Image (cartoon, rainbow, N blue to C red):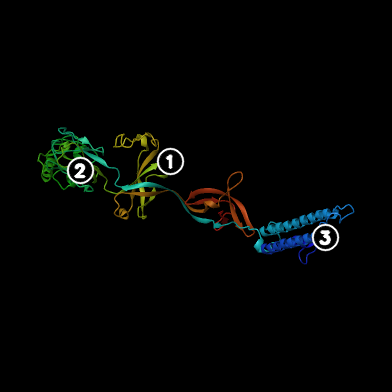
């Protein structure tokens, strides 16, 4: 019993007798525990043998005068007590070894192998950097929204408006048969034929509004000036570019009509040309040669590739005209772009679309109809960087705001304070301490911080 008690709490060698416990490594205590348990088992077996030898039951009549074996009963009581004490001693030794292995008793720190850890599991340094607030959204590379060119109704003489809000004209007289159409993907410029009616070219002119009346000698107005600007750009002369339709203008028109293979009348009717704001790219054909001149002829787009985004209105504050962005293409290459046009917020329920109401109605009806989006267009600074992609799904990273020369740490380093706010666990020479911080911008997994004792290079804990 005495030997087991000493193995639990033995005064340190050379100590002052104050009773301080000697620190042991987990290996030493585990070995001591195993020895103690083995000793306890040996002692128990030895005592059991002595008890059996000393208190072997006797036959009736060999014990006391009345033949009752009283001594063995007392022996069983002593044997039970000894066994209980031995087991308690073994349990105490095992508990002492477990405590020493976990370092729960503390100590003077002399044994580094059992000292409690004081450093955080991971650390990071406070950085001085630039943070940029970004948002990545889905976009589409293409040529923008397509608009439809409508041939004027037969015998109308006035034409009809196309998808640009500009009038699409047919051949002279606004009747006939479509005899030629351009290829899809072709870029049409000023003077090029948009289509042919009865083999007469219907050319493209640049302007901001359609031809809406017959122009002839004596006519005056902005439409006259628009016509003369186009004739001048195409190389015709003999007139002054102004708002008066003179005999010189009429002569230039005859030359132009001759080059188009048309009757040389010297006058221009609403169905003699298609007017658009600039060059256009043919997106798709809506009719075929041999069809009557009526309805949609073709659809076209801008000639430069752009990126279109239907932006969730929750991110509306991220974009303004000129906002910078990075576009990631399907091959993971990137190009720089900027916002050049912002439309009006609309919801799916407000979009009548071109497919009527039957294409995707389903049983849900109004599902998602209230999700408002903001149409945004971006222009790529270097179109060559787009390679051969004509249309593709892309990812657009909008760069909304930037903070330069700020102190920042990983977001994971923030620790919530009781009562509100955040702090950083700062690693010092003596251990760690919590220092309150004020937060700024969050970006790319980092957060701007400021506070007393927070400087560039400060080491902070990062919980795993």
Mark drawn on residue 314: 1
3 and 2 marks in contact (CB < 8 Å): no
Quarter of the rendering containing residue 216: top left
In the drawing, does residue 206 fall left or right of residue 30? left
Quarter of the rendering containing residue 312: top left
In the drawing, does residue 327 fall left or right of residue 444? left
1 and 2 marks in contact (CB < 8 Å): no
Q: How dense is the environment of label 3, judged by Cα within 10 Å: few (below 14), some, or many (20 and up)? A: few
C-alpha distance separating marks 1 and 3 = 93 Å
- Label 1, secondary structure: give it: helix
- Please tell me whether residue 364 is drawn above or below residue 460 in the rendered image: above
- The structure residue drawn at horizontal position 62% and vertical position 54%, both measured from the top left corner, is 433
Disc 3 marks which residue? 54
Q: How dense is the environment of label 1, judged by Cα within 10 Å: few (below 14), some, or many (20 and up)? A: few
**Residue in front for this viewpoint, 177 or 377:** 177
Residue 12 in view here: yes
Give the mark, 3 or 2, whose residue is nearer the N terminus: 3
x then y, percent, for residue 43: 76, 62
x then y, percent, for residue 164: 26, 39
Q: How dense is the environment of label 2, judged by Cα within 10 Å: few (below 14), some, or many (20 and up)? A: many
**Total marks placed:** 3
Give the mark, 1 or 2, whose residue is nearer the N terminus: 2
Disc 2 marks which residue? 205
Which residue is farthest top? 156
Which one is closest to the eye, mark 3 or mark 2? 3
Give the mark, 1 or 3, whose residue is nearer the N terminus: 3
In the drawing, does residue 374 fall left or right of residue 152? right
**Residue in front for this viewpoint, 356 or 96:** 96
- Label 3, secondary structure: give it: helix
- Label 2, secondary structure: give it: strand
| Location of the N terminus (image quadrant) | bottom right
C-alpha distance separating marks 3 and 2 = 129 Å
């Amino acid at each position: 019993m005495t030997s087991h008690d000493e193995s639990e709490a033995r005064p340190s060698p050379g100590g002052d007798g104050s009773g301080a416990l000697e620190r042991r490594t987990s290996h030493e205590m585990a070995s001591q525990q195993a020895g103690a348990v083995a000793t306890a088992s040996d002692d128990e077996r030895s005592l059991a043998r002595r008890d059996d030898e000393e208190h072997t039951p006797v036959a009736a009549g060999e014990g006391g005068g009345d033949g009752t074996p009283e001594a063995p009963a007392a022996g069983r009581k002593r044997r039970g007590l000894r066994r209980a004490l031995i087991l308690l001693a073994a349990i105490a030794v095992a508990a002492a070894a477990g405590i020493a292995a976990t370092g729960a008793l503390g100590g003077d720190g002399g044994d580094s192998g059992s000292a409690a850890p004081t450093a955080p599991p991971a650390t990071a340094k406070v950085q001085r950097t630039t943070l940029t607030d970004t948002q990545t959204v889905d976009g589409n590379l293409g040529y923008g929204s397509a608009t439809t060119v409508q041939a004027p109704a037969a015998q109308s003489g006035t034409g009809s408006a196309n998808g640009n809000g500009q009038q699409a004209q047919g051949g002279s007289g606004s009747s006939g048969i479509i005899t030629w159409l351009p290829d899809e993907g072709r870029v049409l410029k000023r003077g090029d034929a948009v289509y042919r009616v009865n083999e007469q070219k219907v050319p493209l002119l640049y302007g901001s509004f359609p031809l809406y009346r017959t122009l002839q000698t004596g006519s005056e107005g902005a439409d006259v000036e628009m016509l003369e600007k186009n004739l001048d750009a195409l190389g015709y002369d003999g007139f002054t570019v102004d708002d008066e339709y003179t005999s010189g203008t009429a002569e230039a028109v005859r030359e132009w009509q001759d080059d188009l293979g048309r009757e040389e009348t010297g006058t221009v009717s609403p169905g003699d040309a298609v007017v658009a704001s600039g060059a256009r790219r043919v997106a798709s054909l809506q009719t075929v040669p041999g069809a009557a001149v009526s309805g949609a002829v073709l659809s076209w787009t801008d000639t430069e590739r752009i990126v279109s985004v239907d932006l969730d209105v929750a991110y509306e504050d991220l974009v303004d005209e000129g906002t910078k962005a990075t576009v990631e293409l399907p091959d993971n290459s990137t190009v720089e772009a900027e916002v050049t046009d912002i439309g009006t917020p609309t919801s799916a329920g407000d979009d009548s679309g071109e497919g009527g109401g039957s294409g995707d109605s389903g049983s849900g009806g109004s599902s998602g109809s209230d999700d408002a989006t903001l149409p945004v267009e971006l222009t790529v600074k270097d179109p060559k960087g787009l390679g051969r992609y004509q249309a593709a799904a892309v990812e657009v990273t909008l760069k909304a705001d930037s903070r330069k020369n700020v102190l920042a740490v990983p977001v994971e380093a923030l620790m919530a304070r009781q009562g509100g706010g955040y702090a950083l666990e700062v690693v010092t020479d003596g251990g760690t301490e919590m220092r309150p911080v004020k937060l700024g911008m969050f970006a790319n997994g980092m957060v701007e911080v400021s506070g007393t004792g927070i400087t560039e290079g400060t080491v902070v804990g990062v919980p795993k």
